[in-house]
Amino acid sequence: MARAAAGRLRPREARDRGAVHALRLGLRDGMPHRSLPQHLRTPGHLEGWGNGKQTRSFCFVDDAVEGIIRLMCSDYAKPLNIGSDEMVSMNEMAAMALALEDKKIPVKHIPGPEGVRGRNSDNTLIKQVLGWAPSITLKDGLARTFVWIKEEIENEKAAGGSTDDYVSSTVMTQTMTKECDMARK
């Protein structure tokens, strides 16, 4: 911070155009890349919001951090997308997750927020500007995350904790107001 304030670092804007699939960000947040492995622990079915045809791209946290560091060390001063251009449907992602433990269970499509139909990162500019693009595939990143989640669940069980919250999804709602309440926090 002091360096930035002294003008030694210039601000940069990195835009995450795909979700960052990351380790150690919490198990109860409902993000598909972290919640799919938990759902594999339940017998019977895997839950997915909507029809599963919505598409996304996911960037592993190691790649996201590397991209941000490369951007900060560059002379490029305009916004730049940092994300994976490997786009998959949520049905394809479910199949990848099920394959991690060779599970043969159906996907149960349930009502829930789907967001936009498709989202993906265009990495043309990042390749030109930084000579780099994310390299960790979704399949590899999901496998790494799956192993970590299994370890965390086993650690919680060993400590006497409950893992019941890890096997279902809850649709959360938020009420918006016309006033900003940030000053009260």
Image: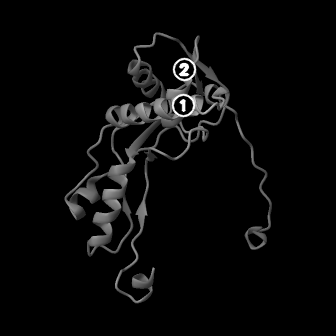
On the image, the x and y values in percent for residue 35 come to 54, 32
Task: Name the residue type under label 1.
Answer: Ile
Q: Secondary structure at mark 1?
A: helix
Helix, strand or loop at label 2? It is: loop
Residue sitting at x 41%, y 82%: 4
Q: Percent position (x, y) of residue 151? A: 46, 32
Q: Along the polypeptide, which appears first: circle 1 or circle 2?
A: 2
Residue 109, image x, y percentages: 60, 21
136 sits to left or right of 30: left
Instruction: Work out whether residue 82 can be spotted.
Output: no
Q: Amino acid at mark 2?
A: Arg
* Residue marked by disc 1: 153
Q: Residues within 10 Å of mark 1 (few under 14, many from 20)?
A: some
Residue found farthest to the left: 131
Establish if 98 lies above or below 118. above
Taking 34 as reference, is 81 above or below it?
below
The answer to whether residue 33 is left or right of residue 122 is right
Give the quarter of the figure containing the C terminus. Answer: bottom right
Q: Which mark is residue 41?
A: 2
Residue 7 in the image: above or below residue 113: below
* Residue 30 % position (x, y): 60, 37
What residue lies at 80% left-to-right and 64% top-to-bottom?
A: 178
Q: Quadrant of the N terminus?
A: bottom left
Q: Are marks 1 and 2 in contact (CB under 8 Å)?
A: yes
Q: How is the image coloured?
A: one colour
**Residue at the spot x=35%, y=36% of the render?**
138
Judging depth in this view, the residue of 22 and 52 nearest the camera is: 22
Q: Quadrant of residue 39?
A: top right
State the CA–CA distance, disc 1 to disc 2: 10 Å
